[in-house]
Image (cartoon, rainbow, N blue to C red):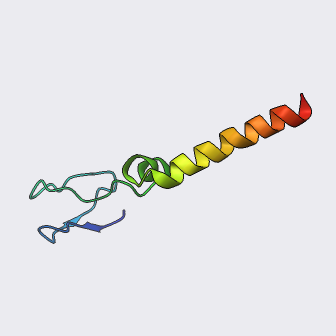
Amino acid sequence: MKEIICPNCKKPLYDGEELFCHFCGESLRKTGHGFFGRLRYGRLQPVLIAIILIILLMFIFWAVFF
């Protein structure tokens, strides 16, 4: 099992899926580490730029091939 140290009380936790410390109840600060977490908690500017580029490429593809 993966050992996680609580950033608040510094006690070790051995359950890898916990989001809160068993001892003090504080967050283990695990949000935002995955792809969807970065989309949800990250800055929106890169995501909006990617969406706009995809939409522009769709219109260009549509105009050229149809």
Residue lying furthest top: 66
Percent of width and height locating residue 35: 50, 52
Percent of width and height locating residue 53: 66, 47
Question: Is residue 54 toward the left or the right of residue 21 in the image?
Answer: right
Query: Please, is residue 3 above or below residue 32 in the view?
Result: below
Query: Please, is residue 55 above or below residue 32 in the view?
Result: above
Question: Is residue 33 toward the left or the right of residue 27 in the image?
Answer: right
User: Could you say which quadrant of the image residue 33 lies in?
Assistant: bottom left
Percent of width and height locating residue 46: 52, 55
Percent of width and height locating residue 38: 44, 53
Q: Residue at x 36, y 64 (%)?
A: 2
Residue lying furthest left: 24
Question: Is residue 16 toward the left or the right of residue 26 in the image?
Answer: right
The C terminus lies in quadrant = top right
Label count reads 0
Front residue of 22/33: it is 33
Residue lying furthest bottom: 10
Q: Residue at x 9, y 58 (%)?
A: 24
Q: Residue at x 90, y 33 (%)?
A: 65
Front residue of 23/48: it is 48
Front residue of 46/34: it is 46
